[in-house]
Image: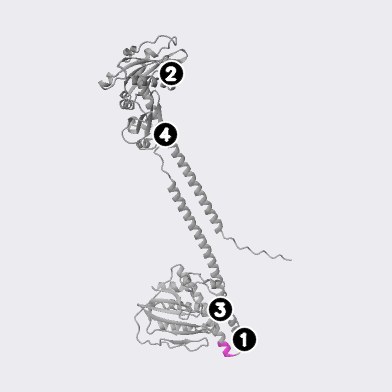
Amino acid sequence: MATLPRPLSRPRSNAMVLAGLLVCTLALATLLAYEAQLAARSHRATAERALQDYAAVAAWELVAGVTDQMQAVLGGALAPVTRARAASPYELLPAPTVLAASADSALRCSSQVGDQARFYFRIDFRDGSLATSGATPTPAMRRWLVDSITAQVHALYQPDWTYAVALGGPPGERPLALAYGVRYAEHSSAIAAYGIGTCADVVGPELFRRVISRRSLLPSSVRGDASSDSLLSITVRDRTGRILFQSEGAPQSPYAADAPLKQVGPLTVHAVIRGRAVDLLALGSIPATRVPWLVGLLVITAAMIAVTVMQLRREHQLARLRADFISSVSHELRTPLSQILLFAETLNLGRVRTEQERRTATGVIVQEGRRLMHLVENILHFSRAERQMTRLGPEPVDLNNAVATVVEDWLPLAAAADVRVEARYAPDVHALADCGALRQMVLNLLDNAVKYGPAGQTVSVGTSTGGGRARVWVDDQGSGIPERERDRVFDSFYRLDRHANSAVAGSGIGLYVVRELARLHGGDAWAEQAPGGGARIVIELGAAAPAPGFTDEHASIVGTSQGAPAGPRA
């Protein structure tokens, strides 16, 4: 027994595959945007860390410069009493007058008044005694000096230091700068502190300005030909927060660092990178955030993908509509062809017995041939309209006469469908129209009225004028067209929901052809409700000058389903 071949399965649409690929593309674009943002953020973080490091380097460079400057001044001045360790913790200590020779030129005040208050001191940590030479400090200053130096030596001073500077004074008195060094015994035991008491101005703006001008606080790759002071904003504060020095101009960036100046003050150096230094960095300026650009690109990508998906969906719908169109057209073509073939074979085989039967057979062949020609013309007009190849030759036309001729030719089809036709022509209606296109439009309206109206209905055809325009309208007695769909019925392949799955034959291009031809005439076509409750389709054309000699009745019966004679014509 032979095995029948399996039916070929319908090829699946690749729309879902393309949609999946587009979604994957969007996901990949999102991932790439995220990675780009991470890279930009990492670059920015690296640049910011570099700027913070430059600020820290600048602050520590200033600390080192001040420390070296003070070392150059005080190292030799305090060396006679602090360089050598004591042989015993109990040895006799030299008087502070020994500093007058070695430290006389160190830390001189800029004013004569400040120099008059200059003195030298020795604090014996073994018994807490204070000895001075030079100017005599007040009792309050003596107590503050002993307490401050003793506390600073035990808490801050390092054995490898050669000097330290304490700033301040008792409340109500002029602050001083106390530059001192510590004399050690064996086992790093501090036994005494020797120092100079002078005005606090010696540790002030002039000192820091001199260090900044002499020392390069930033690397040459950042500094270039500019000075450190123009690239940095330096602020020096004491432990109470009082500003001892501040660069001119406000800081212009958030990149800053602090460094402690323990041997002097102790003080805190705050360095801020100015905006100009940021631009001079070897790494380049700080990259701006790319989030808005990346989000914008993602939105554009998503929008393009959405449009593509919509286009794919539209293409799928059009493919389905074209398939339905081919099926509908094939069904509509099959009916007249079957009738033509049937009666042609009847005539060919000589099966007609009377002249009446012969006329009937030839009449059916002619009638179905006209229907077939109408269908073919509709398809041709649709194809030309899609490719914008329709060419018309409008000329003045007696609209009543032209419409009456079309209706008369259509009466046999109306009779076959058991439809009564009523014509209502306004007098003297003339229009600029292409006769062939006008015939196709009217036939489409009549055919539409028969298809979607009930059996035994009366189809009304009429003309009217107004506002320099001429109109042709056709009414049926069907269910009408919902208002929300009255414009969509003129779209290609569109059918009302109630007719989409019905047995009513239709290709969905009839009204589309009507509107396209009307607009090529400079007019339009629309749908509205008929006075009797059905649908009315109106064609509007440009009016032409009336031709003399044409008269007709405003309302006349043109024909019936029983083949009644046509109404009056010019």
Q: In this view, does 230 lie above or below 37?
A: above
* Other-residue count near label 2 (Cα within 10 Å), few / some / many at <14 / 14–19 / ≥20: few
View extreme (right): residue: 1
Circle 3 SS class: helix
Circle 4 sits on which residue?
52
Where does residue 422 sit, x and y in percent of width and height? Answer: 47, 85
- Give how far apart the Cα atoms at labels 4 and 2 are: 30 Å
View extreme (front): residue: 139
Q: Is residue 176 above or below residue 519?
A: above
Q: Quadrant of the N terminus?
A: bottom right
- Cβ–Cβ below 8 Å for labels 3 and 1? no
- Give how far apart the Cα atoms at labels 1 and 4 are: 110 Å
Circle 3 sits on which residue?
336
Q: Does the magenta stretch include residue 357?
A: yes
Q: Which segment did they paint magenta?
A: 354-359
- Give how far apart the Cα atoms at labels 1 and 2 are: 137 Å
Circle 2 sits on which residue?
160
